[in-house]
Each structure stands twice: as C-alpha cells, then as structure tokens.
Amino acid sequence: MKNLIILHGALGAKIQFEQLVQKLTPHFNIHTFDFDGHGSKSNADGDFSIELFAQNLKDFMTFHEIHKPLIFGYSMGGYVALKLEGFEANSFEKVVTLGTKFDWNPVTSEKEAAMLNAEKIEAKVPEFAAYLKSLHGEIGWKLVLERTAKMMMGLGKNPSLRPYDFHHIQIPVQLLRGSEDTMVSKSETKNVQELLANGKFQEIENWMHPIDKISVDELAQELLRVYLPG
C-alpha cells in the first residue's frame, strides 16, 4: 500500500485525525506527527515558521524512510507541504490540501493574529480554550497561540510561498475548500490552482473551515475519491 502522511493545521495536532486514520488505514500506510511546538511536542522551544515545519516534514520522511508519499495537508499543513515541494521537487507523489490559506498580506495576517488572544478566548469561547488545552496541555496551548500569531504576522510581511514557487511545483495538487469556509476564500484558492502546472480545485458544499466541524466519513470518502480514482 502507498504511504499517506496527514499534516495538521495551525493550532492543531495529530490527535485530531485519529478517527480519519481509522477510516483510511485499510487503504494506505498512514503516518501522522506533530509539528514542533504542537501536541506531543508542545514543549519544543523556538519560534514557529513554515520553513521549520517543512523541515519537520522532511526529517520525518527521512527518519521513517518514506519516499514520495501521498500528502493530505489540512489548512497550514497544506501550505507546509507545498513549501517543501516547491523547494525540493518531487518530494511527494500527490498533495491534497483542505482549507489552506494562501493570501497572506499585512491586512489578513493582522486580522487572523488578532483572534489568537488566549485571555479573550478563555473569556468569550471557553469551550475552544478547553479544546486547545486538550491538544497542547494546560501551559502549551497559550504558547501555541502566541507563536502562531507571531508567525502569521511574519507571513503577512513575507509570505513563504509566492507565485514563482507555485510555478515550480509539477506534481498533481488537489485544492479543496469548503463552501462555508470564512477564513479561506474561493478566489485565493483558485488563483493558486491556476499557478500550478497540475492543479485542480474543488469546492465542497456545506463544509466549514474547522476540521472538527467536518464529517469524518465525508472527508474519508473525499480523500479516497481523490487518491484512488476509479
């Protein structure tokens, strides 16, 4: 069976995909891991960056001797995968992204970063604070918010992926977006699809951005359709 690596998004962790892994295990050799500073690695020091996470992915593949796997990158995970593929061509067989934000500029970055205030989240959305604590621990969740906000502000000033990076990517890339995604626009996703040599775009009705708001069964079926056509 082919290897499939699942990459979590910003503020996320590999534990979010346990049910999806169960659904896909009969069809692939599934691999998941936490980016530095997230989940089981929440104690890792240092700032977050797309370049760091791309290196995490490369190191994971090297350690486990995984060659040209399939990739499913949710949100930031998709951005990380395309960053590595743009830097080292043919790292993967195929990449599928879901809800990946590509339009990073000072305005969008400031908007997204402003939402990552731990005190405000605890006061206004306590259930989300509890969810983040379950992923990263009582102390780690606040560090994840702080480091992610700083990374987003950096992306606004200097995006890690620019048009010429997408031009260098030759492998098949499937860009998925939920029709109810309020973080990622249809236009920014289609713009990237047009820059890719072998890119496809699909909008899925009624899907939202948060991964925990998407049916695991529906997501598994969609990935099987993309990875195992026919």
Image: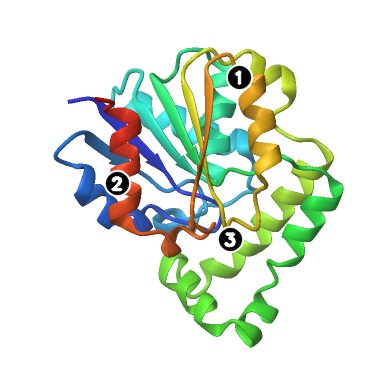
Q: Disc 3 on helix, strand or loop?
A: helix
Given residues 126 and 147, the one toward you in this image is 126
Q: Residue 196 carries which label?
A: 1
- The image quadrant that residue 79 belongs to is top right
Q: Distance between the residues labelled 1 and 3?
A: 31 Å
Looking at the image, which residue is at 44% across and 64% down? Answer: 213
Q: Residues within 10 Å of mark 3 (few under 14, many from 20)?
A: many
**Vertical relation: 101 (above or below) 80:** below
Residue type of the residue flagged with mark 2: Ala
Given residues 27 and 110, the one toward you in this image is 27
Q: Disc 1 on helix, strand or loop?
A: loop
- The answer to whether the residue labelled 3 contacts the one labelled 2, judged by CB atoms less than 8 Å apart, is no
Across and down, in percent, residue 118 comes to: 65, 74
Disc 1 vs disc 3: which is toward the camera? 1
Q: Is residue 160 left or right of residue 196?
A: right
Earlier in the chain: of badge 2 and badge 1, it is: 1
Residue type of the residue flagged with mark 3: Val
Across and down, in percent, residue 105 comes to: 82, 43
Q: Distance between the residues labelled 2 and 1?
A: 25 Å
Q: Name the residue under label 3.
A: 144
Earlier in the chain: of badge 1 and badge 3, it is: 3
Q: Distance between the residues labelled 3 and 2?
A: 28 Å
Earlier in the chain: of badge 3 and badge 2, it is: 3
Q: How is the image coloured?
A: rainbow
Q: In this view, does 89 lie to the left or right of 115?
A: left
Given residues 152 and 143, the one toward you in this image is 152
Looking at the image, which residue is at 62% across and 49% down? Answer: 46
Residue type of the residue flagged with mark 1: Leu
| Quadrant for the N terminus in the image | top left
**Vertical relation: 153 (above or below) 31:** below
Q: Mark 2 points at which residue?
A: 220
